[in-house]
Amino acid sequence: MPSSSARVNASFSDREVAALRGDFPILTRTVRDDRRLVYLDSGATSHKPTAVLDAERTFYEQHNAAVHRGAHQLAEEATDDFENARATIAAFIGAPAGEVVFTKNATEALNLVAYAFSNASPNEQPKDARFVLGPGDEILVTEMEHHANLVPWQELSRRTGAPLRWLPVLAEGALDLSDLDTLLTDRTKVFAFTHVSNVLGTINPVAALAERAHAVGALVVVDACQSVPHLAVDVATLGADFIAFSGHKLYGPMGIGVLWGRAELLEVMPAFLTGGSMIEMVTMERSTYAPAPQKFEAGVPNAAQAVGLAAAVTWVEAVGIDRIAAHESALVDALMNGLAARPWVHVVGPPPGTPRGGAVAFVVDGVHAHDVGQVLDDAGVAVRVGHHCAWPLHRALGVTATTRASVAAYNTFGEVEALLRALDRVPGIFGIDLDEADPDAGLGVGPDARAGSVALRGEATREAS
Amino acid sequence: MDLYQELILEHSKRPLRSGLREPFDAEVHHINPTCGDEVTLRVELSGEGADAVVRDVSYRAQGCSISVASTSVLAEEVTGRPVTEALATFESMRAMLTSRGTEPGDAEVIGDGVAFAGVSKYPARVKCALLGWTAFTDALARAGVDISAISTATNPTVATSGSTATQGVSS
């Protein structure tokens, strides 16, 4: 992992990781004819320690009430639990509690910001010019975005008439910044990009990009789903104006996500969902809204999930985010080295030795990712296959689909070995001649790659759909 | 693992009747949105109504071994057959694939399609195996065939209507 503090930390010892795994009951189950589960799909969702399950259960058993309503004792306790959870999660990312908005997931958090621009743009009451978009303005994203940080901006573009621009991706998985000055201009109102790619593992230089964006007056929205669970993120120094991340990738429950935004922006930003809880005053004609973060939390909130996520954060802090980062980095190195020793496998993203996130996606020459994943699953190894909700990125890489292994704190070096052993069955099953494997074939990016530089089963067609 | 039968691997390596040919009565482009697999498929019919015959099925498939092989088997099984028989073959194939392993499939009706019986135990792969087949029924409908009698449900053992495949005529 990337941060210098992580490098001075060691990965977990076998004893440490064994103790840590004891917190995750699901890791002891078997799959597919009594094979031990080897879970390498934490980039999709992480497992949850018992502390998280206990926290949710305790909330429901002891304090259950609709928060911010009622004057009875349970309502007070539930509200305290909810707001304490907010404070815990805010402190984890270096933010004041009031800057953390709970959503149902990261996708909703990103939509919340996109819709704020949209809701500010029609001709109504006075509003903050930073959120007003029109045909003369532009939205900037990147080609490596998860659909959650692309489609909402496409829709915002469609609603406001502000064109969508994007930074392309270079062959080795970094953003192509050569045209940054023509793509990021004083027309750009918002620049949305991922901190860590969920496919490539690329770690983007958030502070540098944010500085450029701020210099032209653009707001910076960062998808932090693949960074917050895996490395220390401090919003005070990150440079972003907004970050979004999901709870369920951070050892927390499903159904809870977080939007962090600078207080002064949250204050002037229009509401997204409206209704109960988010109001200040309501008449039959019109309403005024509560201050942030309540302004963005319409309806009875997901308090039990917030409490669960706070328990997850507490668990991560007890283990140590820098230790987790160092452990995951060592696991990724082992995986990268193992894959590099197999010339019939091509990893997408930065080359070995480059700091990268916890996801490693690869192509097996001549075999579709679905088929690779099926063989791994047969050995009890759970990975993700497909385009990982980053279809344009895969198109740019010239591949239909990739196989992605992603690690978390509880993974072991033995599990990396198990994946590599299972992978070695793939060429035999699909009759791939290993002597013909071309270690230099690589994965081109750009128009040539789009024509298909990687041999996939079936007739390679790259028709636009 | 019993999923990758030799017949499937053979069809996936050397798909039968592949390539797009003229003339054709309808062309469709179907996508599996979960993995990005695509098939462009054309049908050419002869005759009208109940007497219609599938004269040709031609396609370009990009996908996993299951989806490519299944499309190959489709082309082999329905070409030259009356449309009514081709729809019965689809129904039989669909019923087997969505049975969660309870229906072995009838070789009399689906031929090499029986090799895909193992797929039904893997719900995530059923859509792969049905990609070409649902494209085929869509192409028939666009060529004017009444397909209202068949079910196009592709969810394993769940009786819902409609397929989740993104549909559209490529142009």
Image (cartoon, rainbow, N blue to C red):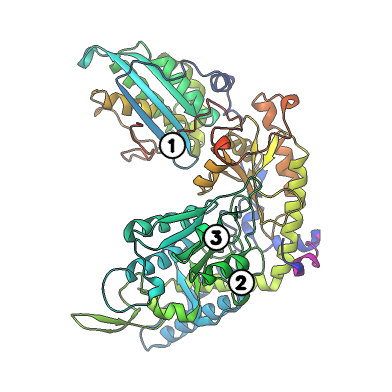
Tell me the chief SS of the magenta region: loop
Instruction: For the N terminus of chain A, give its image quadrant.
Output: bottom right
Q: Which residues are magenta?
A: A5-13
| Residue underneath mark 1 | A464
Chain on which label 2 sits: A
- Which mark, residue A242? none
The answer, for residue B104, to whether it is visible in the render is: no
- Which mark, residue A181? 3
In the figure, is residue B32 to the left or right of A230?
left
Q: Say few, some or many: other residues with alpha carbon within 10 Å of mark 2 (under 14 / 14 to 19 / 20 or more).
A: some
In the figure, is residue B149 to the left or right of A14?
left
In the figure, is residue A433 to the left or right of A223?
right
- Indicate the amino acid at tag 2: Leu
- Indicate the amino acid at tag 1: Ala
Magenta run includes residue A11? yes
User: Marks 2 and 3, how far apart in space?
Assistant: 21 Å
Q: Is residue A421 or residue B12 the one in the foreground?
A: B12
User: At x 44% / y 77%, what residue is drawn?
Assistant: A266
User: Marks 1 and 3, how far apart in space?
Assistant: 29 Å
Q: Is residue A71 or residue A406 the one in the foreground?
A: A406
Instruction: For the C terminus of chain A, give its image quadrant.
Output: top left
Q: Position of residue A303 (x, y in %)?
A: 46, 74
| Residue underneath mark 2 | A238
Q: Identify the secondary structure beneath mark 2.
A: helix
Callouts 2 and 1 close, C-beta under 8 Å = no
Q: Position of residue A257 (x, y in %)?
A: 49, 66
Q: Say few, some or many: other residues with alpha carbon within 10 Å of mark 3 (under 14 / 14 to 19 / 20 or more).
A: few
Q: Position of residue B155 (x, y in %)?
A: 40, 39
Q: Judge whether A214 appears above or below A158 on screen.
A: below
Q: Identify the secondary structure beneath mark 3.
A: helix
Q: Identify the secondary structure beneath mark 1.
A: loop
